Amino acid sequence: MSNTETAPDELVCGERPGHAVSVLEPREVPLGGPRAMTVRRTLPQRARSLIGAWCFADHYGPADVAKTGGMDVAPHPHTGLQTASWLFSGEIEHRDSLGTHAMVRPGELNLMTGGHGICHSEVSTPGTTILHGVQLWIALPDEHRHAPRAFRHYAPPVRDLGDASARVFLGSLAGETSPVETFTPLLGAELALDPGARLSLAVDPSFEHGVLVDLGAVSLDGIDLATAELGYAGPGRDALELVNRGDEPARVLLLGGPPFGEEIVMWWNFVGRDHEEIAAFREAWQAGSDQFGRVEGFEGTPQRLPAPALPNTRLVPRRNPK
């Protein structure tokens, strides 16, 4: 998914360990167009830029496609990151400059690597009535941030946890391990909790974790979270306690990884290391550079998203608070 804000924030992101559970509230961002589908963004924000290498989280829906127009994102570029697409309902058609033509479906991971440069399009399919899911970005470490284009698809099995269940799409949790390789240690899982469920999950104490609530009222280590909020738990824990406080089923995404030890600059759809690099990425995309390739088979309008103008000042740091 593209960040289609007309004046995207500039970000220099870094991480430092912490131990308190904190709550990150989402902000609403329209994806653009006359019937703009609105997403709820919890990463990045002033309170926190990354959780492990997870650097971007958009949560959207359930949205009636007849009213919102669904998703119709023309070809747009990425550098220095991976995109992880995860749906709860609906279907999205993905095309990219690697030549991939794939469908994003509920409970199935589509992971695209755009290190040196890639472009892709995303369009909800005609049969989709309700669109509901998340779009996540993963920052690539310096030694791999120019990795070649790649695409992986994985449909994780459902792991029964008693009064809860898990789909582990990246990393390891509750006896399940995803076969999808990552450039830094990561955890990504969908957890479904029955009404009143109490779940204790053993986790890697070197990881920091985020719990993004999709449905229901959930507490993380005793801290209450509402729908679309993200609870952050710093490193040092060997277990996470999740409780469904409601009378209806709840569903969350669990994201984790060791604190990302590098500073990154995020602007629009690019991840780089400084202002000059981001400006060069933008110029290359505007010029139609082969760095990003071409998406074949996309029939929408426009044929490609133009990059917004850079701010009048240098891209400046926005770090996590100390």
Image (tube, rainbow, N blue to C red):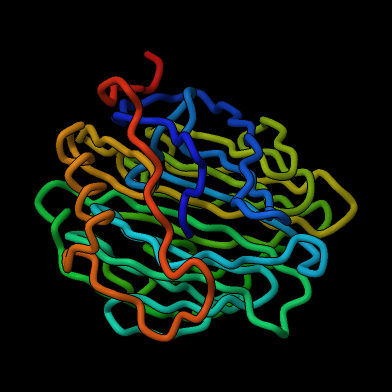
Q: Quadrant of residue 25?
A: top right
Looking at this view, name the residue that lies furthest to the right: 247
- Percent position (x, y) of residue 259? 30, 37
Looking at this view, name the residue that lies furthest to the left: 143
Query: Would residue 255 be visible to someone looking at this image?
Result: yes
Decide if residue 293 is on the left or right side of residue 32: left
The relative height of residue 98 versus residue 47 in the rendered view (above or below) is below
Q: Nearer the viewer, residue 102 or 284?
A: 284
- Percent position (x, y) of residue 91? 63, 78
Q: Nearer the viewer, residue 282 or 234?
A: 282
Identified at 38% across, 33% down, the residue is 236
Identified at 57% across, 42% down, the residue is 41
Identified at 40% across, 16% down, the residue is 321
Decide if residue 168 is on the left or right side of residue 194: left
Q: Nearer the viewer, residue 96 or 181?
A: 96
The relative height of residue 214 versus residue 275 in the rendered view (above or below) is below
Decide if residue 286 is on the left or right side of residue 304: left
Decide if residue 218 is on the left or right side of residue 311: right
Count of numbered circles on the image:
0
- Percent position (x, y) of residue 19? 44, 25
Q: Quadrant of residue 33?
A: bottom right
Query: Would residue 161 be visible to someone looking at this image?
Result: no
> Which of the image's four quarters has the C terminus?
top left
The relative height of residue 150 versus residue 191 in the rendered view (above or below) is below
Looking at this view, name the residue that lies furthest to the top: 322
Q: Nearer the viewer, residue 165 or 45?
A: 45
Identified at 69% across, 66% down, the residue is 70
- Percent position (x, y) of residue 192? 68, 62
